[in-house]
Image (cartoon, helix red, strand yellow):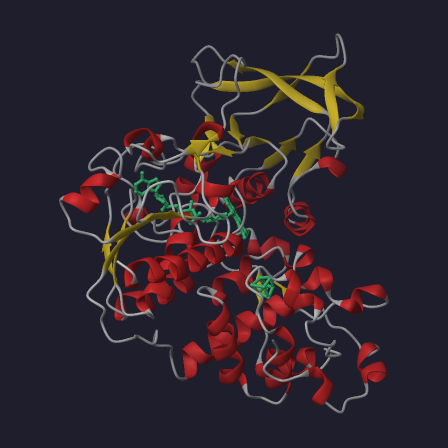
């Protein structure tokens, strides 16, 4: 329900609907590819007020609220912003979301809140995401934010995985008075907010300031602890005495290019490894394994294989690291690409090229064993399948080579099955996804809850965070009844 009912507002909706629109300011492509700083130039107070005043205040429930996975009360926030009441608007976002400063920046707005804005019919939607970012940043700068804590209940919850799902769960549990410890395999908290999403989409200092909020609320973070290997989920209950466990371990195993010779060549990287080495402060890198401390040797001609948002992130990271020619190879056409159009537009503006209907079949080495080209075959699209997707098939004798000295495989992600394998009676499906009750995150194991990408497969920051919040309500109920 909206805090400020639209029906109570005396406004001229027709006049609002034709107000001029000014798009977000972006740093020019030739400047932004010289560094990893934010691409978007955020609103100032004046611009925020002007943009929020374009909202026509649809009847409750407004379509933008329904399209937002966390059901932000966007119309009320717009009204508060329009009247310069920025901190009140920020408080409203904090009520509905555990990570508003992150979601405002990284949500695919065009598919969620902004995509459903009725102004799309004849005009341009209100820039809800940028306004969310502005207000929450404003509050942090002017009065700061303290997570409101309830009196201690004496109950202890272990969260496995410090990504958006674990954080959403933690924030809500802290607010109900429970003690929270987060275990993560990586040295620093944040999950893909740190070890995935590049800085030019989500500056790391935004995250570090956010994390400070959690630390101030008394959360304990235990890094470099891979649950299922160094200790099991059962150890958390029996040896460490936790009363409940939330699993938010994401879905972070890079999909492999099966049956394609040469993927082990020097110069061929998996997307996660490439993005971590390219984007993350060396002090936060894991000592070994994916994204380990070995420096990245950036190529001059880089190909990125895949069609999702991760592929766009890799293209744009390669350009910032100094690659001279950066090309995306994708086996279907642009229409079938799963990634968002905004990231692709940014990648193109920055100089990335695209080759569609192109399937790599072999990575080729020079005499020193280093990658020198990728052999590809031309594809054509068949008839749509049951899901409406057109299957690509190779065009016979159409092989050709694309010269490159670096290739990045951005083919999607699989869940890590280790927790399922090492936790008796924890039901999983489809290669390790955890089976839950969708409304509560309850698993087949008593006292164990789960949510985020490890339940749904790769999705979004906002959906993972919402799943964590929902599970927190169920955990609270469980703890109070046991
Ligand atoms: C390159 C890239 C770019 C993306 N860009 C966007 C974007 O712009 N917008 C958007 O909305 N979404 C984006 N996403 C998706 C988004 O990041 C994820 O959907 C979201 O982070 C999922 O949250 P999560 O908490 O479920 O998992 P994660 O963020 O993956 O966090 C899981 C955490 O669990 C830890 N972990 C895993 N296994 C164990 C274990 N056994 N023991 C202990 N710890 C463990 C991991 O180290 C990690 O810290 C992107 C994803 C990638 C890969
Ligand atoms: S959380 Fe995401 S979808 Fe919801 S209002 Fe904010 S930017 Fe839009």
Quadrant containing the N terminus in the rendered view: bottom right
Picture layout, residue 59 above or below residue 398:
below
User: Within the image, what quadrant is residue 475 found in?
Assistant: bottom left
Which image quadrant is residue 174 in? bottom left
Q: With respect to residue 355, does 440 lie above or below? A: below
x%, y% of residue 220?
Answer: 22, 59
Note whether residue 158 is visible. yes
As displayed, is residue 365 above or below residue 235?
A: above
Position of 26 compared to 425: left or right? right
User: Can residue 46 be seen at all in this image of the molecule?
Assistant: no
Name the side, left or right, on which 226 lies relative to 466: left
Which residue occupies 78% across, 68% down?
Answer: 118
* Residue 88 position in % (x across, y down): 51, 84
Query: What residue do we see at 75% from left, 12% from top?
Result: 398
Q: Is residue 416 left or right of residue 233?
A: right
Of 103 and 268, the residue lying toward us: 103
> Extreme front residue here?
481
Q: Tell which residue pokes out farthest to the left in this image.
A: 239
Residue occupying the far top of the picture: 397
Identify which residue is drawn at 28% across, 31% down: 422
Query: In the rendered view of the protein, which quadrant contains the C terminus?
Result: bottom left
Residue 157, horizontal then vertical, whole percent: 26, 56
């Amino acid at each position: 329900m909206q805090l400020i009912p639209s029906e109570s507002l005396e406004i001229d909706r027709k006049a609002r609907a034709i107000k001029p629109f000014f798009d977000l300011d972006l740093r020019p492509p030739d400047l932004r590819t010289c560094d990893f700083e934010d691409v978007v130039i955020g609103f100032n107070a004046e611009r925020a007020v002007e943009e929020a005043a374009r909202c026509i205040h649809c009847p409750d429930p407004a379509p933008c609220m329904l399209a937002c996975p966390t059901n932000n009360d966007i119309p009320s926030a717009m009204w508060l912003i329009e009247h310069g009441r920025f901190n009140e608007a920020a408080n409203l976002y904090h009520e509905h979301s555990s990570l508003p400063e992150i979601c405002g920046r990284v949500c695919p707005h065009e598919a969620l809140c902004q995509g459903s804005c009725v102004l799309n019919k004849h005009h341009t939607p209100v820039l809800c995401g940028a306004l969310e970012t502005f207000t929450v940043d404003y509050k942090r700068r002017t009065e700061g934010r303290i997570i409101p804590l309830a009196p201690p209940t004496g109950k202890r919850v272990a969260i496995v995985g410090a990504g958006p799902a674990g954080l959403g769960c933690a924030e809500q549990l802290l607010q109900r008075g429970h003690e929270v410890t987060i275990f993560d395999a990586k040295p620093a908290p944040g999950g893909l907010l740190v070890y995935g999403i590049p800085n030019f989409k989500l500056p790391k200092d935004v995250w570090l300031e956010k994390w400070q909020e959690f630390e101030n609320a008394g959360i304990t973070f235990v890094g470099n602890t891979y649950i299922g290997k160094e200790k099991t989920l059962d150890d958390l209950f029996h040896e460490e005495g936790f009363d409940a466990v939330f699993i938010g371990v994401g879905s972070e195993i890079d999909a492999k290019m099966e049956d394609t010779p040469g993927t082990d060549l020097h110069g061929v990287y998996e997307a996660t490894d490439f993005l971590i080495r390219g984007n993350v402060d060396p002090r936060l890198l894991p000592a070994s394994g994916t994204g380990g401390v070995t420096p990245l040797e950036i190529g001059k001609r880089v190909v990125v294989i895949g069609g999702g948002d991760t592929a766009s992130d890799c293209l744009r990271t390669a350009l910032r690291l100094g690659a001279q020619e950066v090309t995306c190879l994708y086996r279907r056409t642009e229409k079938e690409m799963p990634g968002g159009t905004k990231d692709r537009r940014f990648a193109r503006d920055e100089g990335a090229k695209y080759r569609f209907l192109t399937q790599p079949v072999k990575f080729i080495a020079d005499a020193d064993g280093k990658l020198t080209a990728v052999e590809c075959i031309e594809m054509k699209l068949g008839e749509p399948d049951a899901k409406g997707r057109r299957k690509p098939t190779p065009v016979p004798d159409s092989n050709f080579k694309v010269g490159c000295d670096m290739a990045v495989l951005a083919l999607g992600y699989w869940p890590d099955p280790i927790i399922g394998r090492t936790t008796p009676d924890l039901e999983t499906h489809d290669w390790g996804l955890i089976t839950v009750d969708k409304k509560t995150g309850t698993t087949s194991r008593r006292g164990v809850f789960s949510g985020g990408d490890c339940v749904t497969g790769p999705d979004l920051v906002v959906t993972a965070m919402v799943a964590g919040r929902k599970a927190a309500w169920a955990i609270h109920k469980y703890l109070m009844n046991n």
